[in-house]
Amino acid sequence: MRIVSGRFKGKRFSPPANNWPTRPTTDYAKEALFNILHNNFYFEDINILDLFGGTGNLSYEFISRGCTDVTYVENFGKCITFAKKMIRDLEIESEMKVLKIDVFSFLERTTNQYDIIFADPPYHLPKIPLLPNLIFEKKVLKKEGWLIIEHDSNNDFQNNPYCFDVRNYGGAIFSFFSNESIKES
């Protein structure tokens, strides 16, 4: 894996892959996603919530591109250990907060709001369809913010009233949601 742009551009990292429940976002999909985000947000001015953070791949990319307020949420201990090591190596302790907690528990409890929420749950997770409505019900997303869920073809959010776009990048599908796109029933 590598960071594709920004101050850490080209930085490679290799998490130990034995028995990890992760599936890192490909460079191709990541570049496409960040092209979309770059045209809609000033990274220096926003805060990010990275749900099912895994290796931290997306969190490091956001920070590399100028974000200074990233919250990474993951429940798998080895991922947490790896993310903390990367934070030290990149010297981004003041920019990235690591929380070891179940994502759904976190969403039920948090009172914070975020400009961008990125969720990359395990594709086989049966609770994936619950994510958008939970995030909007709990008001975790700021009014003009975006929620992006990475998923496979087993999930389809196009009929969700908050979904405004879906992009497919070779098996990785990004569904985009916002408060402003609420569809009339």
Image (cartoon, rainbow, N blue to C red):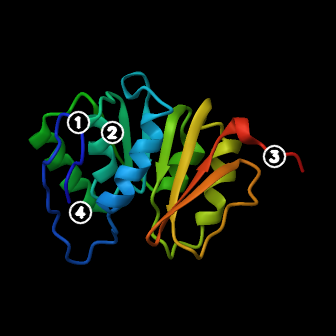
* Cα separation between marks 3 and 2: 29 Å
Circle nearer the N terminus (2, 1)? 1
Amino acid type, mark 1: Gly
Point out residue 129 in the picture as x, y percentages from the top left corner: 64, 64
* Image quarter of residue 157: bottom right
Residue behind mark 1: 6
Residue 97 visible in image? yes
Please identify the residue farthest to the left as the structure is shown: 89
- The residue identified by callout 3 is 183
Name the disc covering residue 62, or none: 2
Residue 75 seen in the current view: no
Query: What separation in Å lies between label 2 and label 1 (alpha carbons)?
Result: 9 Å
Query: What crowding class fits label 1: few (fewer than 14 Cα within 10 Å), some (14-19), or many (20 or more)?
Result: some
Q: How far is mark 4 from mark 1, CA to CA?
A: 27 Å
Mark 4 and mark 3 lie on one chain; the one further toward the N terminus is: 4
Q: Which mark is residue 97?
A: none
Considering only order in the chain, which callout, 1 or 4, is on the residue closer to the N terminus? 1
Label 4–label 1 contact, CB within 8 A:
no
Residue 98 screen position, x and y as percent: 31, 43
Circle 4 residue: 78
Distance CA(mark 3)–CA(mark 1):
36 Å
Eye-nearest disc, 4 or 2: 2
**Front position among marks 4 and 3:** 3
Q: On screen, 22 above or below 27?
A: below
Q: Which kind of residue does numbered mark 3 sit on?
A: Lys
Of the two numbered discs 3 and 1 on the same chain, state the one appearing first in sequence: 1
**Sequence order check, earlier mark of 4 and 2:** 2
Q: Residues within 10 Å of mark 3 (few under 14, many from 20)?
A: few
